[in-house]
Image (cartoon, coloured by chain):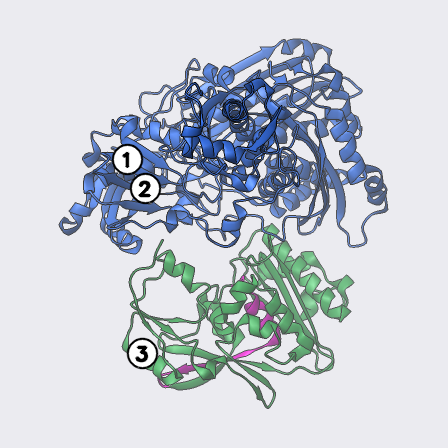
Chain colours: A blue, B green
Amino acid sequence: MKKQGVGARLVRKEDDRYMRGRGQFVGDIRRAGMKDVAFLRSPVAHARITSINIPEDIQANVVTAADMASVKPITAVTSLPGFKPSNQSILAEGKVRHVGEMIALCIAPTRAEAEDLVARVEVDFEDLPPVHDMLQAREKDSPLIHEGWSDNIFLETLVDYDMADAEREAAVKVSREFSTARQCMSPIEGRGAIAEWDHRLEQLTLHTSTQMPHIVRSGLAECLGLDHGSIRVVAPDVGGGFGYKGILLPEEVCLAWAAMQFGHPVRWLEDRRENLTASANCREHHYVMTAYADKDGKLLGIDAEATVDSGAYSSYPFAACLEAAQVASILPGVYDFPHYRCHTFSAATNKPPILPYRGVARTGVCFAMELMIDAVARELQLEPTDVRLKNLVRPEQMPFDNITHKHFDSGDYPEALRQAIKAIDLKAVRKRQKKGETDGRLLGVGFAMYCEQAAHGTSVYAGWGIPMVPGHEQANARLTPDGGLELRIGAHSHGQGLETTLSQVGHEVLGIPHEKIKVVHGDTAYTPYSTGTWGSRCMVMSGGAVAEACDQLASRARGIAAKMLQCKPGEITLKDGRAHGPSGELSIEEVAHVWYRRPQDLPEDVDPAGLEVTSGYKPERDTGTFSYAAHAVTVAVDPETGEVEILDYVIVEDGGVLVNPMIVDGQIYGGAAQGIGTALYEEMIFDSEAQPLASTLSDYLLPGPTEVPSIRVFHMETPSPYTRFGVKGIGEGGAIAPPAAITNAINDALKNLGAELAVSPVTPRRIVEAIAAVRRSDAA
Amino acid sequence: MKPVAFDYARPRTIADALELLDARPGAKILAGGQTLGPMLNLRLVQPELLIDITRITDLITVTETDDGVAIGACVTHASIEDGAIGGIASGHLDQVAAGIAYRAVRTRGTIGGSLTHADPAADWFAALLAFGAELEIAGTTGTRRIALDDFVKGAMETDLGPDELVTAVHIRKCGREARHGYHKICRKTGEFAEAIGAVTVEEKTGRFRLVAAGGSHAPVVFTDPSSLFRTADPLDVRSFDVDMTAAALRDAGMNADDYDLRLRAVAMQRAVKEAAQR
């Protein structure tokens, strides 16, 4: 048999239906009597609602907050000291706090007709001053987003590890201001849900495009005042999540309420305009940073003030400080230095809530830290890679507790960088740079590194005290009467390929051919509880749980086989899907057949537990696995137009033991494409009235096939000492480093002109204006 | 977003289309729908009737004329890309067509629809201004011919009357020595242009048309090279002055900032360079 277990490059099982257009997404589901919903959304960012006028003939089909008095607002609090909770009403109550906030729900036979109803509802507003910028939000006299708050800060944190010492000792001090644009996550499929009430089961069923069906169920139960048992949440095929679908949306609550109220199924499918202007916001960071170093580039300390634009509300379940609070703990990145101070602010503004996006907080942090490393190198006239090599955590320090007490489990960071230097051929690039380009473009090379905490569990999240804390992850494993295997997990697969990789784990333990293994996921009725798919956790957590459940199933199967082969269970070994005993062997299929179909062939004292197991798993340490990578990129910059061409892109990555290297490659390519979007294209601009200025994909630029180069990926493999099979979470890394690596490459190209970029995305206009600014200051 | 409810008609002749247009004031012409479609969905237009003109035979044919070709208004970008206009100007326009948006858009989008919409960031607009193309327009009272320069009244503004229809684009065959250049600067493949430079130079006749387009500002056509070049030769790329050109664009009324003006000037410079190299 061809290798099918851990390490096999199997083609993804789920691709058969996806590639044939047979996936079943929320938008593919039909229900008898189903009606469509469109939401009336606020056209203004900050205003009091003085009246809502609904024409009499459509009043029965329009819902406002006044109708939903019994429904609780979404509140996602944390236990971090000083956190200010916000109440996100399902439909706006009295006040709107961002453009796109829902004011009314309109129901009609089709979406077009529902939009006709929306157009007929009139809302009068009394304008309030909008807060469109996070630094403006922090000012003392800023208008307040939430009444009763003393300022606009969800949470302020400060850590200081003897920063004053670094200030005294350092030979050089380099200061910079960095910022990353607000972005919109752009899964091909937007959000969407169908809600219906089942009178037989007395149960609400919500089909929704989510990454975390069980968490959505808890959130719905809390808002609607229902028992968990009265709610079933199903996530069918989901066309990309990236964090956007790891959030309980007010739309989901509203739809669930409407299904109960109206007595027929209701559907809402988010369109791209809603996605862009009302919801999928992420990423917006601002940093003021100073690095202290000795004259050789050895870092003595980093002092940072970081602000994250959290938007108007704290989203469920990750809360409004997810980004900023993490910034403080992960800013040091892959480096080892003795002093550190970080002051963070999660600022509320009149924008949609900031939501977690692939590489949560890490992309901004990597941008700030890695641009800072290059700035230090330029200041000291050193090769940026030399400065990195001087400061990286070394392999002999592993496992390593860094300055913020992150526990790096394993790896060889300098080796990853050395391999990247070699693969991009730094020497050759430097030589070519000296020669110059015949077309007048400027060549640059940039590097960026990160490490990525993944699959972190109870010990990390308990400290945050958010509504959801992951504990032991569970899986259910069941042998079917024909010797097949069903695996049930509470997480969800939407691009991660879990239907394949978890089959590989099942095969690894039980030897059952992966074609006969079925992974069931995404349905609270069928699967054990799970916090869902986020934080690059599923291969570690669900993979570990599946292995654990399969181990126990193997032991049960050995027990039954021992009865059949008349030996002791300890004498049975399971190999390649067969039970081998001292005097004979059986296939697992035969064991299953006898257990289910011919129990008369088994003695009375057989273990009655049978061939179905639910078991749980946590790594030996739940502080997370740390994948890491070095990205290296060469670019050509046209100084006249600001156009950037990526000439070569190399990623050297270590994700521990890879269950399916082909799937990991896919994750890296996809993540890097999104990172290129962050670096060069994606920007949701808000004007001074906090109006979003991109409402279609012709204004909000995403990289397409011609903007994403062929990326060369190289793997290192340092097993995690704490996880089953030595796997590490790997899903997000691709999206973390590209903005930093590409911007460093652009700055390298521009260094002889004296221009430097510190804002993402690095647009042609920003490049040309940076060059022009240097020329102006030179002239002056 | 979904469109408001509208009626739909698909006439087979120009006369029928004009009759509908005249009879229903809330009507709108639908050609390839690549701009109108999104505008309908966003409810930026809410017509009572859409008149689909893509099945009118006269509008989807290319005919040779005495001095060039007449391209039916509903000829698609894709068919021009594939050679429908017979490689006029050594295939220069075929290449312009091939650079419009994506193939899927080109398969539906039409040359007449693009010109009628008059988006200054659209390729045909700039390329055909450089060619000095003319449009044929049919109305209930008869047909007329108008130079593209006169048809365009500004960004998204044209001379087209409410009861009129663009039926064809006339392109004069240039002499063999004519040189063409086209350079588009856009953020990514398939996007509308930030800046376009398009040029036609006929040395024998001294004909010179250099167009600055792209972005949201109405295009500017230069027919006199002297404000752009330091020497008299419009094919001497080295004497093309980006700063002078940016100033000339401002003088011509282009109300854009320094970056946008310079970007157009650079696009023009690169179009001239391409023409010179042919």
Q: Residue lying furthest bottom in this view? A: B66
Depicted B120 relative to depicted A586: above or below? below
Say if labels 3 and 2 share a chain. no
- Disc 2 is placed on an element classified as loop
The reply to whether residue A250 is in sight is no
Tell me what residue is drawn at x 20 percent, y 31 percent.
Answer: A69
Q: Read off the residue under disc 3.
A: B20
Numbered disc 3: secondary structure: helix
Which percent across, then down, holds residue A158? 53, 14
Marked residue chain, label 1: A
Residue B6 versus residue A8 in the image, above or below = below
Q: Position of residue A748 (x, y in %)?
A: 74, 38
Q: Quadrant of the N terminus of chain A?
A: top right
Q: CA distance from mark 1 to mark 2?
A: 9 Å
Task: Read off the residue under disc 2.
Answer: A42
| Mark 1 or mark 2: whose residue is earlier in sequence | 2
Mark 3 vs mark 1, CA separation in Å: 45 Å
Find out whether the residues at labels 3 and 1 contact each other: C-beta distance under 8 Å.
no
> Is disc 2 on the same chain as disc 1?
yes
Q: Could you tell me which quadrant the C terminus of chain A lies in?
A: top right
Magenta-colored span: B120-141
